[in-house]
Amino acid sequence: MKKYLISFALLFGILFFGLAEASETLANGMDNSVELIQTATDSDTHSADAAEIHAEEGHGEEHHSAPAWLVIPFVTLLLMIATGPLFYEHFWHHNYPKIAVGFAILVVLYYLFVLDNVHGPVHALAEYVQFIALLASLYVASGGILIEIDKKSTPTANVALLLIGAVISNLIGTTGASMLLIRPFIRLNKANIQPYHIVFFILMVSNVGGSLTPIGDPPLFLGFLKGVPFFWTIEHNWPAWALALTLLAVIFYFVDKKFGQAAEDEYSEEISYTNKFSMVGTKNFGWLLVVICAVFLDPNVIEGVPAIVYDGQKFSFLREIIMLSVAFLSYKFADQRALKGNEFNFEPIREVAFIFIGIFGTMMPALELVGNFAKSPEGAALITPNTLYWGTGTLSAVLDNAPTYLNFLAAAMASEGSDISNIAQVREFAANTMNDSDTTFQLLAISIASVFFGAMTYIGNGPNFMVKSIAEQNGIKMPSFFGYIIRFTIPILLPILFLVWLVFIAFA
């Protein structure tokens, strides 16, 4: 495993620092190409010559497209994630880091040496570092906070905790809220804890709940960085958020009333409750605040923030250093009573880190193929709020929802003749002041789908895997990858997603 990790680190180190000069040349070539296109449109008589020069000068920055068969490693990895814990648990548990990293290296090497494409792997690395730095810091900082609720578990108490978690997820992110509340939720239901408790926690707290602010979920945060106003999400997403959470809460209430009570009746031990609420390790809320504040230290938004400039784009590193420092310091100075009470360990974040190395590394061809089609004339003709909702949602369930959000937003804006890299145009797109098309509903469809559909599978959103892992460490037998989908998300979540589409998107 160490050999894979060292190779992976060296490979991307070369990308960032060894090819900087080449990438700057390519970026300049792109700028020259744009100028030539503008000159061509001003003078029809010189259009042919300008096009020829543009082709010659722009050729160096073009990258070969990934072949369709290159999605095989990604599909294979997904199948192994789904079947490994079910059919070959011992082999999977001991070898999933090697498998995930190995598949990622195969795809990255193909991009580098066959497709001559450095751009894709560099962006995948940057997105992965941002992803894991945020998740790790929130996971470790919240792990040092012990919340004790000595109260009898009832459907009403459970629904209240889930709804509180859904609101909190907009303040400290779905990851922060999930890691803060999953253990108290398990302890609250210690007399009758069942897999459906954890599944509804994933649906409500780890996903749907965090759709009101850019802090709530990574795709919305990336949209904010691209130019979507901070309060756009709460202004436009709250009706769908309220409907989805209400339906989930009602369904959970009746499920818990039926099955939770039955399980509790079988629990023979008599338990007395004090109805007290207590917290240990409250200083770690300060570390969580540092992480949330660091989220906004983006060089593309705030001038003067240090950045790595590559391929004409600024990549943040100060923010990630702060987050990883918080992870280290919050653990080092955490209240040991809180860590012991939470039975804190690093296995859940370790599993997420390795699994998502594989996902980020292998999903590049899938995203590229979808993005290229969406930006083509044929794909652009198909872009409507309906196709954006179901397209973004379907891919967000099996790909990371953050890059999926950006790909579909880029495609939607391209169909309107605008560019996602232009902050002013993104704001116009969000404000619906661009063209005759109702772009607000297009952005609404992308935003809701990327967050809501992230709950469809264990890999749709980072916190899903961590919550599942923590539950299993507490002795809860969670459904398999396909079991989760067949038993819960298809019969429960999918009808709600369909109703949300029918009410808010279908007739837009």
Image (cartoon, rainbow, N blue to C red):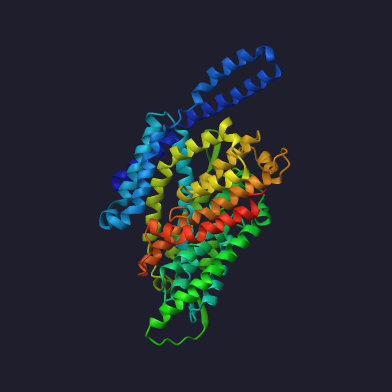
Q: Would you identify the image quadrant in which residue 293 lies?
A: bottom right
Q: Is residue 356 left or right of residue 257?
A: left
Q: How many marks?
A: 0
Q: Tell me the residue at 37%/59% (across/down).
A: 480
Q: Position of residue 279 (x, y in %)?
A: 50, 75
- Say if 429 sits above or below 334 in the image: above
Residue 395 or residue 507, whichever sits in front: 507
Is residue 191 visible to us here? no
Q: Is residue 462 left or right of residue 407?
A: left
Is residue 174 visible to us here? yes
Q: Is residue 109 left or right of residue 55?
A: left
Q: Position of residue 290 (x, y in %)?
A: 55, 59
Q: Position of residue 250 (x, y in %)?
A: 56, 69
Residue 111 or residue 441, whichever sits in front: 441
- Say if 249 sits above or below 306 in the image: below
Residue 491 or residue 412, whichever sits in front: 491
- Say if 391 sits above or below 295 in the image: above
- Say if 377 sits above or below 179 in the image: above
Q: Tell me the residue at 55%/28% (across/down).
A: 27
